[in-house]
Structure formats: structure tokens, C-alpha cells
Amino acid sequence: MSRRKKGFKFKQFFEPQPHDENKATPGIKEPITKKALLKRLDNIDDLVMKEVKVGGSFVTVIYLSALVESTILNDMVFNPLNQATSENPDEIFKNYTSLNDDELPKLIHDICSGYTCLMFEGSIIEINTFSASDRSITTPENETTVMGPQDAFVESVETNLSLIKKRIRSPQLKSKSMLLGTETKNNIIVLYMDNIANQENVDRILRRLENVEYEGFIGLPVLKQMLEDKPFSPFPQFGLTVRSDNVVGSLLNGKIIVMMNGSPEAAILPASFLEMFLSPEDYYNRWTTATLLRTLRLAGFFISILLTSTYVSVLTFHPEMLPPQLLRILAESRAQVPFPPVLEALIIEMVIEVLREAGARMPTKIGQTIGIVGGIVIGTAAVEAGLASNILIVLVAVTALLSFIPPSYLMSNAIRFVRYFYIIAAGAIGMYGQMIVFAWMFNHLLNMTSLGTPYFSPVIPRKPTDILNSIIRVPVKFFVARAGISRAKKDLVRPLDEE
Amino acid sequence: MDKGNFKKLNKYHVIFLAQNTMIGIGLFSLPSDISDAGYNLWLVPIFLGILANATLIPIIMLCKKFPNDHLFKISEKVLGKVVGKGLNVIFFVYALLACCSVSRSYVRVLQTITLPEYTIAVPSILLYFVMYCIAHGGVKSLARFCIFSFFVTGWLVYFIRWPFQMGNWYNAIPTFEISMYGWLQALFHGSMSMFGYGLILFYYPYIQDQKKAFVHTSIGIWIAVSYYVAVSLGSVVYFSPWQLDQLLFPVLNLLQAVQLEFVERIETFGTTLWVFLILSTTAVYLWVAKKGLDALFSHHQNRTWHLIIVAFISWFLFAGPIPYDIQDIIFDDWGVFYGYGLILVPILLLIANKIKHRKQKQQTEEAASS
């Protein structure tokens, strides 16, 4: 054995483990017997197994009561069975699927998905009776807009698909579904426009999905992290949305959408850094307002990461940079504060972070009250007690607000995370530290990819038409080409010779 | 990150690689370096630009003869394994020292301006860490960072507005009263700021449009020259001849002329932002040094640990226990000769290649006739 093999097998650690044959996997063949079925489904409280007499013989009905409503069950299964005169399923039911007698894993999977299994003397059939309750379509809570459609995705992928297909009535909208998660069997749907999306991108995401080997996903954001190009990066590499208009826009722009049953989010891929600062409302507004807001969002990113850290570095290392009047105000404000600026900034940043987190976790009714009152009371008391200067409170509050400007929640989280690096570096070696972190972060961003396409697009690599819809948003009339990052099949949005 | 041996540099990459490897720390002291030319000094960068463009011709000629090889491979092919490897050692040392020299000068300036109470250890380690990260991404990462740093720092040239406003424009009228010796001295001392475009010898194989490499590199050279001319003009207009001669870093004093309502001493900001220009220069040299180590020890195979080694050696050369006087000799006094060496070597290699070909032709003719 070589020396290399004795050590920790890092690669093997991440490699998928072999399949457990006992798990219900629909593709594998195994004979169906009542005994084998009961063995697999033992210790399940809500498993119902009834014998119903039909004609001269008994039919065994098996289902999971948690997934099936009794009225639907009666309508679809028991009433037809009770009224039946023959033992032939064709004469009893209008819609059913018959199974071969070696499809035990598929049967078990279907029973666990809400199907009802009926075992006749000579045949086994199943009927889709899944009727678990769903949340109704409501307005989006995270990505709110003043104008535009207000229907957000829910946890049912079928409902979400209907919201999308309602808007794109074209056979070119293709969807490929697959089951992922060895235990949860999450239904994953990959959506794309066949005539627009780049086939290489579609193949790439399908290949990545096929290689995912995991017990189960509690939500799409978990799966998304497994598909991203750089798992260690703090920046999100795929877009995440709950808005149907966002998804439709992305599909028409040549992007690919991944959705999952049980998760109200849809992943948009590939996505670029700048796209994290775009909101669907940009397109509902006039181009002037939209451009102003976009510029503000992007400027907000830079101000948010640099403002507090500049306060720290200027006060700690470069007080000579400030004009005397401003320095006097700062010195007076900080006169009572016993901590160095870096510690002061970190404490207040953490307090804001705690308030945000507590506000998000608390019940809505008290959350807002505690958040506002806590913020004001703690802020004022901290200044009066001499724990922080009021100028810093203002700066931290401004940066906290700015960090929430990006419509992408994951991007605003990333901004708040990287900000700590800037503050610590500023506290350690001043403005040089900030610039070094700035250089490091941008080198990281420049080298990042989203589904194999450069993340910093359209800045790098450049596509001249992307300028029309990146930081600025020119009037929609001038949108002639699709985003460069999609590498779309059809580059032009509309034939230009019509004008 | 793409590190494969395929063509990946587009025209923008080539332009900004050339331009950003030239503007490093040289611009900081350029007006002082070329002060032998007196108030005519703003003409020196233009002459240097013309010279650089002229010396680019043999460099590109050599590259075109070997479109898929960088200089380390070319020297081995032309001069044979032993002599070629010997020459490669010199190139390797040059890249290492150039990286080291620029970093050292910058960290010293940084220490003087922004961190007077600190040693250079922490700032230099951080600088090398980021430099390593940039070079680790391969040549495309270097090129992208060069473009980015151009846009992050390029706007600093706006600050010359204040020196221009306050200064005396009559100083800028060329008088040509300087002796030939003065001009030559200025050209000699200023040439340190021009080296960098020669590194195309190492990234030429990765360029997509190799036919236009000369044009793109020339654009890069002239962008750098225009920056140099702007800063030199600012110095000429703003400073007295005595100040030009005595000030070590005139750019810092130019920045001091800036008057903004909300910031007093803008040179602290300018010096720290300069790190982008430093990183884009040194990272390219570090990458070249790593390629050199690949050539010397791993038969041109890509090895990541080579980058760690060259980064450490380069850092150790100025942060380690080497006497300051010796460092001065190696980096400051000899530095200019390494640069000249790299620019002149292509001419020698072209001649050697021609002789080699002629000999081979003769041999084949002799073999055919006998």
C-alpha cells in the first residue's frame, strides 16, 4: 500500500456512498407480495389495510391515511368498490394505473406519496388519491414590490408550475423532473426554454443533479448549495426567488430554473454578481427611477462594506485625514467611550445583528415592537452609558439598512458577513487592511463562476449590449439582446429589422 | 480556475496586462527619477514610450517564431538544454527580484505614510497572501485583476486637477536647454518605470489574437505613458526644480495639493489604494517566477507548491535578515540592468535562432550533396 493511501481519504469522504437496496427506489424490480409489503411498511401508524368484498372475492386496499382525505378516498375508491358487481378493475374504476407483480419498490414509493394500492386476485392497481392540504397562493413576503403581479410560489411544485405555465404558453417551455434524496424522494423540476436556453448549461445542471447523492432536502436552498460552483464562497452563485414574474423573466432571458416539491423557492441559474442587485420592479418602473435605484443598490454594497471600517481605520490610524471640525465632533462623541474603535464597532454591529436575528425569529406581533423599541432603547442607552459613540450608531444603522437594499436576501447576508473582515482588518492595520481585503474579495469574485460562466459578468467578460441592462437600465425598447451570462441560443430578443 | 494550456487572453486582457505591469511603484517616484531633464521632464516618458515600442518589435518577432512557447521554453529550444536552463535561471531570478523589489518599495512607502509605528512584517505578509491568491488563478486571473485595478485606481488621475490649477503652466513649455548627458541620465533612471511590457514573452502563448498582440501591447504601453505624462506634467507645473530633485515621492506631494471639504490628507487614501497597482504588477512577476520554477524542476508541469515557494523566497528576500545595504544594491542599483537584460535577450535569441537554422540548413545541404 502506498503512503498516500494510508492517510485521510479526503476525496472518498465526499464520494457518494453505494445505494441501500432496502430503500424504496422506483426503478429496481422486486416481486410484490402482501408479506413483503407489510414487512417494508411495518411500524407505520397511519398505514391502513382494509379488506373489501367485491363480487365473490376480497380486495385489499392499502394507503397512508395522513396523505389521503377520507372524502376523496370514498369518492375515488370505496364507493366504486361497494357499488361494483364485477371483480374486473376496468369495470369499477375509470382511472387507475396497473402494476406488474415485480414492481414492489415503485409500489412502496407510490404508497408513501399518497397513492392507494388495491390488490385484486389477479392484478395490482394503484390510484392517485394524494390530497394533503396546501397553502393557498399569497403575496411574496421577502421580495415585495409596489407594482407588478403579487402571486408568490407555495410549497407545491404543481401549483408553482401552473403559475409559470399560465404566463408562458409555449411548447418550448420544457421541464425535466427527477427524484432526489434517498429518503425524501424530493421531486425536482428543471425548467428551461428549449429555443432560448444554452443546451450546454442545461446538460451541465442535469449532470450535476444526477450526481447529487443525499438523504433528503428540507428545502431548495439546501440543494442549491450542493449545485454551486464554489461551495466555500460567502457569495450566492445562483439566484433564489419566490416570485413567478422573476422566474418568467429569467426563463425568457435564457436562464434555467430548478424547483423542488415542498419548497416555495425557485433557483435561477446561472446568475451573475450584478443580477443579485436587480429587482423585477426595475422593469415596472420608468427607466429613470429604475436606473437611480439600481445605482443606489450597487453603491449601497460598497458603502455598506466600507463605511464602518473606514470609521475604525480613520480613528485608529489616520485621524489626520479628517478635517479639524469633523475630528472635533468625533472626538467629543467618543470622549466617554473606553474601547478602541474596532471593539466599539464590532460590539454595535453585533448588537444590530442580534436585533435583526431576534426580530426575525420572534413571533411577528411582538417582533417588530421589540425590534424598534430594543433598537432605540439600546442605542440611546449605549451612547449615554458611554459604550458607543452616537456617530458610530448612525454609521452602523446606515450600513445595516444599506445591506438590506439588495433584493437577494442571500446577497445581503453575504454583505453583512464580509463586512466583519473589513472592520477587523481596519482595526488591525488601518486603511491598508481595508484595501487588502477589498483586493482579495474582488479577486475572489473575478475568479468565481456560476454554472461555469464568469460570475462577474457583464463587467468581465464584457458584452457591449449587457451595459444597457446592468448598472443602468435603459428604456425597455432598447433591450435587443439577452444577458451574456445566459449564453443563449437566440441572442436577439426580437428581430431588429421591424423597426 | 482555468489553468489549462489554451488560448484565453482576449485583446482587453493583453492591453491591461501590459499597462498594469508597467505602472507599479515606478510612478510614485517617476518625476524625481527623471528630474535630470529639469522642466522638460514630462517629455521623457514620451521618449521612453517610443523606445519601449521599438524594443517591443524584436520581442514580438521572437514570440511569433514560437507562438506556443513562453520564454523559458524558447530559450531551451534555441540554446539547448544546458545553456537554456542557465538562462532560465537568470529569468527566474529576475522575476523573483522584480516582484520583491516592487513589493519592498511599496511596503516601505506604506510604512512611512500610513503605518509609521508598525514593522513591515504584517503588511508584507498580507500583500503576499493576496498576491498568491491572484497568481494562483492563472494568467486569466492576473489579466482580470489588471483590468479591475485599472478601473479602481485610474480615476486617481483626476486629483492632478488641483496641482494643475495651482501651478504655473509656463514651466511646461519645453526649453531643451538640458545637456545630452542630462537627457540620457533621465532616460536611464526613468526606464525602471517602463519595464513590464516585456513580460509578454511569458504570456504570449495564451493570447487568442496573436497577430494583433503588438498593437494591443502598444496600446497598453501608451496608456501607461499617458498616465506618466499626466503625472510628470503635474509635477512640472506644481514643483520648483529644486523640489523635483529633492522630493523622494513627488506623487504623494501632488496628492497633498488636493483640497476636498470632507477629507484632509488624501495621500493616505492614495497610498493604500495603490495596492491594486502593486498587486497587479507583482502578481504577474510572481506568476512568471513560478513558471520559471516549473521549467527548472518539473519539466514545465504546473505545480501549485512552486508558487508557495517563490512567494516565500520573494518575501524573505526583503523581510528576512539580509542587510539593508545589500538589498539596496540588488533591488535598486541592479534592478535596471535585469530589465534591460529581459528586453535585449530576444534580440540575442533571434540571432542565435537564425544561426542555428542556417547551420541546420547547411548540414542538410551537405548531407544531400554527399
Image (spheres, coloured by chain):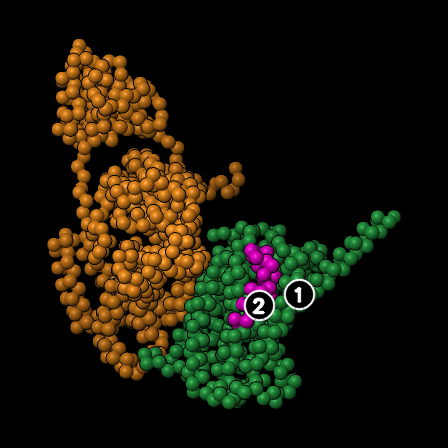
Q: Is residue B301 left or right of residue A296?
A: right
Q: Quadrant of the C terminus of chain A?
A: bottom left
Q: Is residue A391 left or right of residue B64?
A: left
A97 w.r.t. B149: above or below: above
Question: Dot 1: within a 10 Å radius of its alpha carbon, few (fewer than 14), some, or many (20 or more) residues?
Answer: some
Q: Foreground: A131 or A490?
A: A490
Say which residue appears at 49% left-offset and 40% top-offset. A5
Residue designated by label 1: B58
Circles 2 and 1: CB distance less than 8 Å? no
Q: Position of residue A95 (x, y in %)?
A: 23, 24
Q: Foreground: A318 or A452?
A: A452
Residue B257 seen from this side = yes
Local SS, label 2: helix
Q: Between disc 2 and disc 1, whose residue precedes?
A: 1
Residue designated by label 2: B218
Label 2 and label 1: CA atoms lie apart by: 13 Å
Say which residue appears at 36% left-offset and 45% top-offset. A256
Total numbered labels: 2
Q: Colour of chain B?
A: green
Residue B205, quarter of picture:
bottom right
Residue A39 seen from this side = no
Q: Say what amino acid the circle numbered 1 marks.
A: Pro
Q: Foreground: A454 or B276?
A: A454
B269 w.r.t. B141: above or below: below
Question: Dot 2: within a 10 Å radius of its alpha carbon, few (fewer than 14), some, or many (20 or more) residues?
Answer: many
Q: Position of residue A245 (x, y in %)?
A: 27, 49
The stretch of residues the image draws in magenta is B197-224
Q: Position of residue B281 (x, y in %)?
A: 51, 66
Q: Say what amino acid the circle numbered 2 marks.
A: Ser
